[in-house]
């Protein structure tokens, strides 16, 4: 097993120097698990921030040979759980098929005070 930590240039760089955007755990058969750090995005509405976070997630996955269809787990942090439906509507735009395993939490605040949502995912990439 080989572990690679990465912050590809195709996506916004980490907000601090204390973490990487992607941890890739490569198995001997060429398959891999991708663990993405939580993503936030700019925007004034929850929908805009959700959409921006998923666009960044998509770019990070593509940089490692994966797509949103490879997501097997998603963790979402919302500052207002009563807006789960609004978040969910945008999420379905990006994950329209069978939904991955999921956890959603309400938190009092996120890393940036204006952030309303943070999303982290795990994806599985099949070997060649």
Image: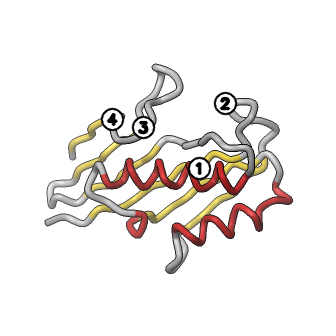
Tell me which corner region of the image, top left, top right, bottom left or bottom right, holds residue 41.
top right
Q: Residue at x 46, y 51 (%)?
A: 57
Residue at numbered disc 2:
111
CB-based contact (under 8 Å), mark 3 and mark 1: no
Q: Which is in the foreground here, disc 4 or disc 2? A: 4
Camera-nearest label, 1 or 4: 4
Q: Position of residue 114 (x, y in %)?
A: 74, 35
Circle nearer the N terminus (3, 1): 3
> What element does badge 2 sit on?
loop
Q: In the rendered view, does 49 fall on the left or right side of 121?
A: right
What separation in Å lies between label 2 and label 1 (alpha carbons)? 12 Å
Query: Which residue is the site of mark 3?
Result: 21
- Seen at 28% across and 51% down, the residue is 64
Measured as percent of width and height from the top left, residue 56 is found at 47, 48
**Residue beneath label 1, please?**
119
Q: Secondary structure at mark 4?
A: loop
Residue 88 drawn above or below residue 122: below
The circle drawn on residue 9 is 4
Q: Residues within 10 Å of mark 4 (few under 14, many from 20)?
A: few
Residue 125 image point, x, y percent: 29, 62
**What residue sits 29% from the left and 47% below the top?**
25
How much space separates mark 1 and mark 4, taking CA atoms?
A: 19 Å
């Amino acid at each position: 097993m080989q572990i690679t930590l990465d912050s590809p240039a195709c996506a916004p760089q980490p907000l601090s120097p204390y973490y990487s955007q992607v941890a890739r755990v490569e198995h001997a058969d060429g398959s891999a698990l991708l663990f993405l750090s939580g993503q936030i995005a700019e925007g004034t509405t929850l929908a805009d921030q959700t959409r921006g976070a998923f666009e960044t997630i998509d770019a990070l996955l593509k940089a490692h040979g994966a797509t949103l269809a490879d997501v097997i787990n998603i963790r979402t942090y919302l500052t207002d759980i009563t807006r789960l439906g609004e978040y969910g509507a945008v999420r379905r735009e990006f994950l329209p098929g069978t939904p991955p395993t999921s956890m959603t939490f309400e938190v009092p605040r996120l890393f940036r005070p204006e952030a309303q949502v943070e999303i982290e995912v795990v994806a599985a990439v099949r070997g060649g």
